[in-house]
Structures are given as C-alpha cells and as structure tokens.
Amino acid sequence: MVLRQKNDYVTLIIYTFRIFFVSIFRMTYPTIYPARHLLTVTLTGLVLAIITALTLDQTVSLYFKQPELTWLWLAARNITNAGLSEHYFILSLALYTFGKWVRPQFVQTRIWARNLFFALITSGIFIHIVKFCVGRQRPHKTENFDPFVFHPFNIHWDFQSFASGHTQVMFTVATMLALAFPRAKWWFFAVAAFFGFTRVIIHDHFLSDVIGGAIVGYVGTMTGLFWIHLWQNRSSRRSDKATSLST
C-alpha cells in the first residue's frame, strides 16, 4: 500500500513537471503581457513545488548527506557559483559596450544585452520579495533537514531558502538565450536545471526551492521584457508626437 502511494506521488510529480516545462517551452517574446501563460507556469510550478516539499525534499537532502557522496558535494560546491548574478551583469554590460561602441552594426547583440540586464534586475527583485515573505529555513540548519521550518518576513540568510536565487539567475539567462536561439532552448533549460540542482546537493536549498527559483526566473524575465516593450512603445509615441508638433 505504501509502495503504491509512493508510485502515485512520483506519477503526479512527473505529470506536473511535464505540464510546467511544456508551458515554458511555449514561450514567445512578450509584445503583450502573457498573463494566462505566466499564470499557468506559476500555478503548475507552485503545485509541483508543494508536492515536492511534501514528498521528496527531506529524502533527497538526506540522500546527499551520505559520507560516500562527499566527492559529489565537493564537485557541486566548486561549480554552483556559476549561478551568481554578478557574472551575467558583467556579461550584459560587456556585450552592450561591444555592440554600442566597438561594433555598432551589432544592434541585436546590444538589445539582447540590455534586455538581459533588466531581466536580471526584475527577476532579482521578485526573488528577494519571495524570500522575505516566505522565510523558509535552509536545509543544513537542522540535523534531519526539516523542510517545514518557516519564519516569514525575515532578512537573515538562514531563512531565505525559498526560492533559490542561483536558480532564478540561471533560468533568467536560459530564458533570454532560449528567446535568442529557440532551437536550443531544451539545452539552455537543462543546463539551468543542472546548476540549480547543485544547490540541493550542497544543502543550501531543498528541491522545491529550486523549482521556485525556476518559476521566478522565468516569470520575472518575461515580465521584465514586457515592461521594456511598454517603455519602448511609450518612448516611440512621445518621439512621434514631438516630431509632429515641431512640423
């Protein structure tokens, strides 16, 4: 009976995971706010995160605590900081500078770099709001990796487990790359998920935190891109209006 119940949970997780990522892969550049699409991604992602928290979080964290997996912890520790946002802020500024002054003909490179910069800011603001409001304790703070310790409205690092900021950054970058190179989007999101999972291996986050970070990274990026599109349209209308008045 217990085995059947576990199989039911696994089936439910796989089914929800499939809906979540299929929804993401239907992305298009947001010239109008994709409210229904982002709502679908957010709700299916949250359902997946809740089911994972109830069934897998503690088990997965305890698994990677085994002494014989110390080598894996060390390997994950060495690569996990690929998810630090400063790398991609520097990259966006470097590409923008290159496309603005070194090779002005590379207009699309400049636009992509600008969009990446603002997408990182938007999703970064979202992730800190979520962390502050949820206040989930990090796995390594309890011996048995209790996934249900919450102190909401807390700015201490120990209580900012949900959602994963590193995963948010990686999914922001993956979303931007997927929009630029749609044929390779599976690879971009797979790499983002891989680096997100390193946060689980080193016990800085639960698995559901990584799912939460993926949601925020994707939704924050698409929202940021839509705001940029709105700003461009308004600037264009003001410019047209000023031109018509001057003539």
Image (tube, rainbow, N blue to C red):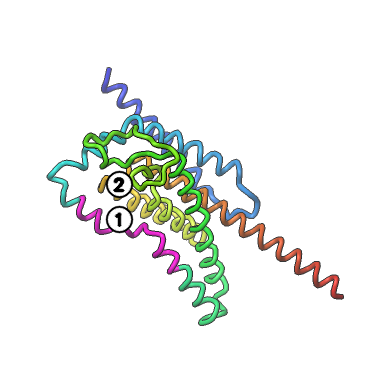
Which of the image's four quarters has the N terminus?
top left
- For the record, the magenta segment spans 73-91
Q: Quick one: which residue is furthest to the top in this view?
A: 1
The three-letter amino acid code for the residue at tag 2 is Asp
Against 241, residue 14 (above or below) is: above
Instruction: List the residue tagged with mark 1.
Output: 80
From the top left corner, tell me how far across and down residue 243 is, in percent. Answer: 81, 72
Instruction: List the residue tagged with mark 2.
Output: 204
Say which of 209 and 45 sits in front.
209
Q: Secondary structure at mark 1?
A: helix
Q: In the picture, residue 21 is in which quadrant?
A: top left
How dense is the environment of label 2, judged by Cα within 10 Å: few (below 14), some, or many (20 and up)? many
- Is there CB contact under 8 Å for labels 1 and 2? yes
The number of numbered badges drawn on the structure is 2
Against 90, residue 218 (above or below) is: above
Q: In the picture, residue 89 is in which quadrant?
A: bottom left
Question: Is 110 a magenta residue?
Answer: no
